Image (cartoon, rainbow, N blue to C red):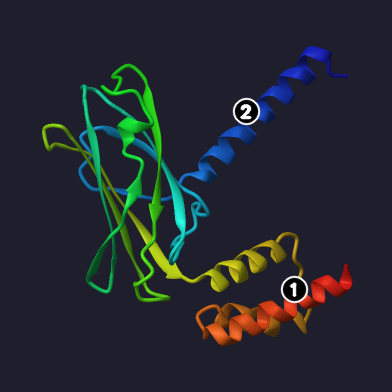
Amino acid sequence: MQSFSEVRMLFLCLAVLHFIVVTARASVVFEDCGSAYDLKSVNIEGCGLRLPCYVTLGEEIPVNVEFYADFVSRQLDQDVTININFIHARTSVTPEPCETVMCPVQTDAVTSFTSVMSVPTNMALNQRGFLQWRVYNENGMQVLCYYVIVQTQNYFQKVLRRFIGNSDDGYEPGDNDIPYKETLYKKLNGTDLYMQRLLRNYYKNKTISN
C-alpha cells in the first residue's frame, strides 16, 4: 500500500507532466530566420502544433513570443507580413513590444510580450503561405525573426473547422458517418453560400434539440 507522501509525489509529477504537455501544445511550429536573441516559443491564438496555422481574414489575433536576451535593447519595433502567392501583405500589429514590457530588455530572464495582429481582408482565400515576424532594436539589428506556415480562411470556415474539431473528440464513426465527415472536410474550401447554408442548418437543429 502506498504511503500518503508517495501518492502526493505521484500526483505532483502527473500535474507537472500535464503542465508540460499543455505548454508544448500551446506553441506553434516555427522556423527561426536569424534571431539575435534566443527565441523560445511562439503562441498564436487558435493555433497549435498542427500545421498550417489558420488565420481568419479581418480578425485580430493575439500573438505571444518568449525569448532570452543576452544583450540589452532599449527599443523594439516590429515588421510583420503575410506572404501569400508571392504577395507580401504588410500586417499591422499593436502595441509595440516596449509598450507592454519593461525596456530596456532584461538580460537575466525570459522576456514575454503579446501583440495583436490584424489580418488583412484583401488577401486570397483558402491559400497557404507564411507569416514572417521580425523585430528590430534601436540600432536596426534584427533581434527576433521567425516564419510560421499559415492558411487563410473566412469566418464561416473558422466556425466549421471548430465544429469538426469538437466533434472529433471521442468520435467513433460508423459506416454511414464516414462519407458525411469526409464531405465536411472537402467543403471547408467550398463556396461561402454552401457553408452559410450548412451552418444555418446546424444551428437551427441545435436550437431545436435544446
Identify which residue, 195 or 163, lies in the foreground.
195
Q: Secondary structure at mark 1?
A: helix
| One can see residue 36 in this view | yes
Query: What amino acid type is highlighted by mark number 2?
Result: Val
Kindly identify which residue carries mark 1. 203
Q: Residue furthest left?
A: 139
Kindly identify which residue carries mark 2. 16
Say whether residue 174 is left or right of residue 127. Answer: right
Classed neighbour count for the residue bearing mark 1: other residues with Cα under 10 Å, few (<14), some (14–19), many (≥20): few
Residue 157: percent from left, percent from top: 55, 72
**Marked residue nearer the N-terminal end (1 or 2):** 2
Say whether residue 182 is left or right of residue 24. Answer: right
Residue 198: percent from left, percent from top: 67, 82
Residue located at (67% from left, 77% from top)? 199
| One can see residue 178 in this view | no
Residue 184: percent from left, percent from top: 63, 79
Query: What amino acid type is highlighted by mark number 1?
Result: Tyr
Identify which residue, 36 or 82, lies in the foreground.
82
Classed neighbour count for the residue bearing mark 2: other residues with Cα under 10 Å, few (<14), some (14–19), many (≥20): few
Which quarter of the picture shows residue 115? top left
Q: Secondary structure at mark 2?
A: helix
Say whether residue 62 is left or right of residue 129. Answer: right
Quadrant for the N terminus, please: top right
